[in-house]
Image: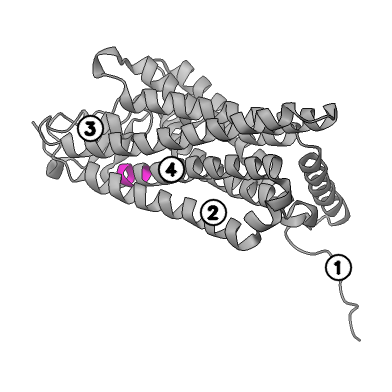
Amino acid sequence: MPNSSSISEFLLLPLADTRQLQLLHFWFLLGIYLAALLGNGLISTAVACDHRLHTPMYFFLLNLALLDLGCISTTLPKAMANALWDTRAISYAGCAAQLFCFVFFISAEFSLLTIMSYDRYVAICKPLHYGTLMDSRVCATMAAAAWGAGVLNSLLHTASTFSLPLCQGNVVNQFFCEIPQILKLSCSESSLREVVFLIFTISLDFGCFVFIVLSYVQIFMAVLRMPSEQGQHKAFSTCLPHLAVVSLFIITGMYAYLKPPSVSSPSTNLMVAVLYSVVPPALNPLIYSMRNSEVKDAVRKVMTRCVSKAVNCPSFGILLPCSNPPLPRF
């Protein structure tokens, strides 16, 4: 059996068995990827450019959009390339880099979702103290902590996973390099350390999920005491989509990493991986923009500004400023 020193590449799970279905999956994933790029890119630009959105909630939303862009860009481009060119291979270094980036973005995003729930709790349950508890320095520190936690968690799991001897071949039963599938390739007695790390990390994630749920219980109790139906509607429209995305994220992620090997199958693994790695980054822009009039107005202004520049500047004035050319001198 080959060991890790003799493996130069891994073989990923193909999305389909026939060439026609592979091309169909390519166009489907391309549509999802472009929609995610457009949605998260518009939200990032709108929040950065509109001074009305320079508040803690939208600052965290900007960070979430950037993490979503990184997360979906880590997995889908390689899957689309394999489907388009009818290949399965990914290099050893490429697999390690993909796993590192994916764990980094996923870990940082879940930390940020926890921070966003705390932000909504303070805004709704303690509005008089919101300016003190969520000032700019505190928000920057919490965002930096989320990104830093992602880096540390990713370094830990990537180093632990790829330090294991691989003696079960090089076929990864997933469309990207996922820790549970790589652990199946290692010697059973050598993977216990990474399993312990995974259980510890998932326990922390579950603790964050409990914190999020408790925060929203307090939020919903405070919202129900509001005399204004408009205020209740606004609070619920902001919090319920957030809670739905978090629930989908944590439930599918825990199933992917904690399910026993006896109940797993390639089709189930593929579906669960799509639910926690592709669906949230693609749906987050839709959820946070369609339910929020301020974000929709800011996005509309950005799109109007870009269209007007493109119309007034035939030479692609979106990237280069339009100006009248200087008159020639004779």
Query: Disc 3 marks which residue?
Result: 183
For the magenta stretch, what is the residue range?
Answer: 94-98
Q: Where is residue 251 in the image (x, y as percent from the top left)?
A: 45, 24
Q: How far apart are marks 4 and 2 (CA)?
A: 13 Å
Query: Disc 1 marks which residue?
Result: 323
Check disc 4 and give the amino acid type. Ser
Query: Disc 2 marks which residue?
Result: 143
Closer to the chain start, of discs 2 and 3, is 2
Closer to the chain start, of discs 4 and 2, is 4
Check disc 1 and give the amino acid type. Ser
Dot 1: element: loop
Closer to the chain start, of discs 4 and 3, is 4
Q: How far apart are marks 4 and 1 (CA)?
A: 45 Å
Q: Place residue 74 in its image quadrant.
A: top left
Q: Distance between the residues labelled 2 and 1?
A: 39 Å
Label 2 CA crowd tier, 10 Å (few <14, some 14–19, many 20+):
many
Query: Disc 4 marks which residue?
Result: 107
Dot 2: element: helix
Closer to the chain start, of discs 2 and 1, is 2
Q: Is residue 96 magenta?
A: yes
- At horizontal 55% and vertical 45% (from top left) the residue drawn is 115
Q: Where is residue 140 in the image (x, y as percent from the top left)?
A: 58, 59
Q: In which quarter of the image is the C terminus?
A: bottom right
Give the left or right position of residue 40, taking residue 302 as reference.
Answer: left
Q: Position of residue 91 (x, y in %)?
A: 29, 42
Magenta region, main secondary structure: helix
Q: Place residue 189 in its image quadrant.
A: top left
Give the left or right position of residue 298, taking residue 219 as reference.
Answer: right
Check disc 2 and give the amino acid type. Ala
